[in-house]
Amino acid sequence: MFKNLAKKYADGNLVLQILVGIALGALLGFLAYSKVAWASGIASSVSVLGDLFVGALKAIAPILVFVLVCASIVVKKITSGSGLKKVIVLYAIGTFLASICGVLASFLFPTHIVLQTTDQLLASPQSITAVLKDLVYKMVDNPVHALSTGNYIGILTWAIGSGIALRYCTESTKMIFEDISNAITKIVKFIIMLAPFGIFGLVSTSVAQTGFDALLGYGKLILVLVGTMLFVAFVVNALIVFVVTRKNPYPLIFTCVKHSAITAFFTRSSAANIPVNLSLCKRLNLDEELYSIAIPLGANINMAGAAVTIAVLSLSAVFTLNIPVSFTEAFLLSILATIGACGASGVAGGSLMLIPLACSLFGISNDIAMQVVAVGFIIGVIQDSVETALNSSTDVVFTAISSKKVE
């Protein structure tokens, strides 16, 4: 019987399960906040579910970042094709501009979230020299120490260095890296599958402590995230299209939204939307030699929505902890969000696992950063769908304006 229940749960709709977890957690938390004795006891007990979920994320995140980034460099084959270099440049520019939009939106509409912190004073370095010095020291940290302490700057540095060093290794070695990457991704998928239980514990604890203030804060956070992503889709991408083509960008933008973004919104997977995008490219009469490479590549590295998510959620933690942010740090955050987005896992909520990388820039501990990741999973029902829609539709937009056959 238990086996059958587990199978039904595993085959169920994760979005629906998370919504149920949020609703039940909010109900239990409200009863506990209202001083209902039995509810307070249960809320205190189920808080362990949230702690276990955050702990699992904290344990897998450093390994995930290292393996995914390293394997991505080692395994991916970038072949030359007509307009491919142009597409890659546009992918990089689009993701970077999206991260800047995320940073600017966070300063214009600062958001705060409920975090469990210690009395330790958190402060950001006040000079450019101190920022860069701290950054360099983190980069040259011992790789084992970086993994064990959650030094994501060091992890990223060693992952890139190792990937470049192994770029021309034998095919059998590349297969090993690909297998390891797939194995880590499966572990992440299993942890995410348990998200409804963890979110139930986290929401019940947050509401029990602060009432519905926590959920209202999540609502504002969703508005900032979705608003920024829509701005990127309809303003930033439109400007890029106009600069490249000198034509009205909106017919192409709306076509990609209609035939790609809507499907991606419901599938919540750029990889699953690849066949849809390939079909759309064929309908647009694009260069097949180009889009057959650019679309699968974009599903892995063109992550404007992920860049927005990383930037906004990281700065939410920064504002919550009252950490001052300099212009230099804001710019470095944009760069880190861009790099992190390109290395985001292809699973639902994969971009959230890169948030600790950005948080480390401000001296935020791994424990607190993983709480931010957990908040991301709570709002992920909406955030991840809009993020995927932006990522996937942008793949076609940039491929179209880079194709020689586009009219």
Image: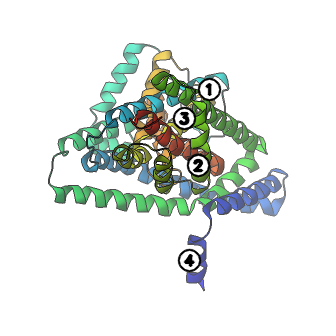
Q: Point out residue 357 in the picture as x, y percentages from the top left corner.
A: 43, 37
Q: Which residue is mark 4?
A: 7
From the viewer's perspective, tell me whether residue 204 is left or right of residue 100. Answer: right
Tell me the tag on residue 259: 2
What's the amino acid at mark 3?
Answer: Val
Q: Point out residue 95 in the picture as x, y percentages from the top left corner.
A: 46, 33
Colouring mode (rainbow / by chain / secondary structure / one colour): rainbow
What's the amino acid at mark 4?
Answer: Lys
What's the amino acid at mark 1?
Answer: Ala
Q: Which residue is mark 1?
A: 105
Q: Is 91 placed above or below 322 here?
A: below
Disc 4 is placed on an element classified as helix
Query: Given this view, does label 2 or label 4 mark the residue nearer the observer?
Result: 2
Tell me the tag on residue 118: none
Q: Residues within 10 Å of mark 2 (few under 14, many from 20)?
A: some
Disc 2 is placed on an element classified as helix
Q: CA distance from mark 3 to mark 4?
A: 35 Å
Q: CA distance from mark 2 to mark 4?
A: 33 Å
Residue contact between numbered discs 1 and 4, judged by CB atoms under 8 Å: no
Q: CA distance from mark 2 to mark 3?
A: 23 Å
Q: Which residue is mark 3?
A: 308
Residue nearest the observer in this picture, 87 or 10: 87
Disc 3 is placed on an element classified as helix
Instruction: For residue 355, say whether it is visible.
Output: no
Q: CA distance from mark 1 to mark 3?
A: 9 Å
